[in-house]
Amino acid sequence: MFTPVHTTLGALMLFQGSSGLLLNNGAVFGISSMLSGVVFNPNRDNLPVIAGLISSVAPICLLIPSLIPSYPSAPNSWATLASTLGTGFLLGWGTKNGRGCTSGHMLCGLSRLSPRSLIATAIFFTSALLTANLVNGGQNIPACPSNIPCYTPVYPSSAEFLVMAATTALTFVFNYLVVPSTLDRSEKSRTIYSYVAGLQFGIGLFFSGMADPAKVLRFFAFVTDPSRFDPSLALIILFGIGPSLMTYLSKKPGQKVGDKTVKPAKPVLAENWRLPTATVADIDWKFVTGAVAFGIAWGLCGVCPGPAILRAVLQPVWGVAEMAGYMLGNVI
């Protein structure tokens, strides 16, 4: 169902987590590289973020359990196990070779006006859209309960709204008031904030509905069955990417004018910016096929790396199979 309030607040949380990591730690919130990194190259940059993302499950379960998605059944046969491994492999291979996913390319890349990320997003979004609507004639896109059109708006209860609004407000206060005034420019401070950014981002995935594969697939449904179309995730463009873009344009981190770096010279908690340096000239066939593969996986199961981590925690049997395929895709 269309959830304008949930998704708007969730998009603001996603914005806070990703832009906070950029402005405070000088790093881009690329979940796919961090996820593979915790296995193949664990360090202070990826472990705290993934730990924070995983930790977001706890407050959601305790305070607002209605936002926990009703996932499809976990693999219960060799066929479903192989299918889950396959989508995990496509997800891992695709994000490795496409150099990112919905967080790194779409949320962070588009907000930094990266032409390379724009091309990647166009490729994987188109691939996901075609896959969701063409495989099985679009029947993999679930209908909404009681056959009510999925574009019908629903709103949070008073208790749900209070929790979500308070969480979003506290996040703004923490990022803009607490961090600059209490944390210094040090490795310890960056580690603390990396964890907090992951926590904020994970909560944003639950609030926005990005953690729900059915909701993601319904966003693609306008092609074959408009009654299944849920427009909620379009609000992430408005309230997630939009504020991130305005923040980037106002700060322009690491921008050089002549031989000088201006606005601002350093992140709040770090000595240097660590922004992607690849350009459109670096796009090759692996980048294109990787983006296509990721889009196909996204269109098949409605899950990208961030939501996959949350689902793996909540549905461990699925998580073992999906993550095994994901890591295999990262080594091939």
Image (cartoon, grey):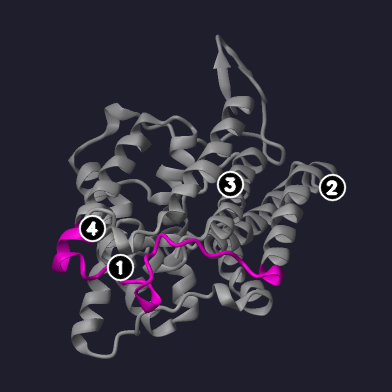
Residue 151 sits inside the magenta stretch:
yes
Question: CA separation, marks 3 and 2?
Answer: 22 Å
> Of callouts 3 and 2, which one flags the residue occurring earlier in the amino acid sequence?
3
Q: Residue at the location (28% across, 48% down)?
A: 124
| Residue at the spot of label 1 | 301
Numbered circle sitting on residue 256:
none
| Residue 220 screen position, x and y as percent | 30, 56
> Of callouts 3 and 1, which one flags the residue occurring earlier in the amino acid sequence?
3
Q: Amino acid at mark 1?
A: Cys
Q: Quadrant of residue 320?
A: bottom left
| Residue 145 screen position, x and y as percent | 39, 77
Q: Residue at the location (46% across, 68% down)?
A: 309
| Residue at the spot of label 3 | 15
> Of callouts 4 and 1, which one flags the residue occurring earlier in the amino acid sequence?
4
> Of callouts 2 and 1, which one flags the residue occurring earlier in the amino acid sequence?
2
| Residue at the spot of label 2 | 182
Numbered circle sitting on residue 296:
4
Dot 1: what SS?
Answer: helix
| Residue 103 screen position, x and y as percent | 45, 50
Residue that sits furthest to the top in the current view: 258
Dot 3: what SS?
Answer: helix
Dot 4: what SS?
Answer: helix
Q: Which residues are magenta?
A: 131-160
